[in-house]
Amino acid sequence: MASEAVKVIVRCRPMNEREKALSCQAVISMDSPRGQCFIQNPGATDEPPKQFTFHGAYYESHNTEQIYNEIAYPLVEGVTEGYNGTIFAYGQTGSGKSFTMQGIVDPPTQKGIIPRAFEHVFESVQCAENTKFLVRVSYLEIYNEDIRDLLGANTKQKLKLKEHPEKGVYVKGLSLHTVHSVAQCERIMETGWRNRAVGYTLMNKDSSRSHSIFTINMEIYAVGRCQIPGSGLWETEHRTSLCNLVDNPRIKTGA
Ligand SMILES: Nc1ncnc2c1ncn2[C@@H]1O[C@H](COP(=O)(O)OP(=O)(O)OP(=O)(O)O)[C@@H](O)[C@H]1O
């Protein structure tokens, strides 16, 4: 599994109060160890359920800590070593994207993927020996196919997507902000969130047209074992990596 470049998992949330009040029937079942998800047509119970296989299948009883450890951890660890990674939540309104990406504070096992990624990155920065890191973040919104910098001086300005022969695809003029702690990352994310085109109250109606990408940019300077002959300087290996966290986030401050 570690060799796969793209991993797809599915998470099934518990029924909400409205669904329970309507006596909705669960049509999903899972074989989590096998990553299998079964969907039963309630109108044709004699037919076998449709079966889908993923890299991970997480049911109501699973929590975000497990999902992070099994799926996101290796990806974020790779980012701290110089590889790019993206975590993308996809699903219809109310399916639990923000619950998984942003999470809640209580219980701690349901803390989201994004705050866990922040903690993971800064833990690596603090623990690494002979390595220096420069961590910068950016936050953009794609709304009606327009790109805007949620942390820029002018958050209304539309930015252009460009391609560079070495850097690849990038957003021209996107601002980068140096961060030194998890708390700083969270504050910056909150600032960006407030600058989004779709306000909180319109979110349910309009969220499908709005996507945001919070990116952690890492510059890694690893001091090598060899001294550069005659210079007295140590060889340094320089790597750069990106961790893209994609969601329609709502900042949740409580349970
Ligand atoms: N695994 C889960 N366990 C418990 N509650 C959950 C779970 N997933 C989602 N919920 C709850 O379901 C509701 C909808 O979830 P959430 O807001 O994360 O959906 P969403 O996919 O981000 O929706 P939108 O696209 O409208 O932003 C929330 O009240 C959330 O707390």
Image: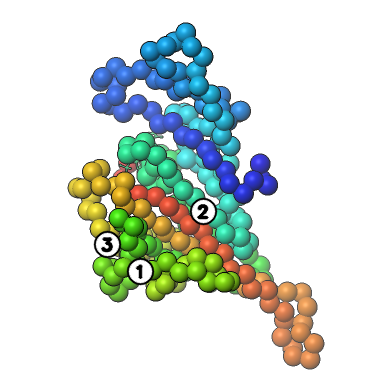
Q: Between 157 and 97, which is closer to the camera in this rendering?
A: 157
Farthest residue to the top: give it: 46
Q: Which three-letter amino acid code belongs to the residue tagged 2?
A: Thr
Which quarter shows the N terminus? top right
Whether residue 249 appears in this view of the structure is no
Q: Report the Cα–Cα distance between label 3 and label 2.
A: 23 Å
Tag shown at residue 86: 2
User: Which residue is farthest left?
Assistant: 201
**Number of other residues with Cα within 10 Å of mark 3, as a class: few under 14, some 14 to 19, many 20 or more:** some
Establish whether ligand 1 lies closer than 8 Å to the Cβ of label 2: no
Near mark 2 (Cα within 10 A), the count class, few <14, some 14-19 or many ≥20, is some
What residue is at 23 percent from the left and 43 percent from the top? 205
Q: Tag 3 or tag 1, which sits nearer the N-term?
A: 1
Quadrant containing ligand 1 reads: top left
Task: Name the side, left or right, on which 211 lies relative to 163.
Answer: left
- The x, y position of residue 67, in whole percent, is 52, 40
Residue 160 in sight from this viewpoint: yes
Q: Amino acid at mark 3?
A: Asn
Element at badge 1?
strand
> Looking at the rendered structure, which numbered label has been put on residue 21?
none
- In this picture, residue 113 sits left or right of residue 74: left
Q: Gap between marks 2 and 1, in whole Å?
A: 21 Å
* Residue designated by label 3: 195
Q: Residue furthest bottom?
A: 230
Sequence order check: which comes first, mark 2 or mark 1?
2
The kind of secondary structure element at disc 3 is loop
Secondary structure, mark 2, is strand
Q: Residue at x 52, y 26 (%)?
A: 37
Tell me the residue that label 1 is attached to.
159
x and y percentages locating residue 251 in the rendered image: 32, 51
The quarter of the image holding the C terminus is top left
Q: Position of residue 118 (x, y in %)?
A: 47, 57
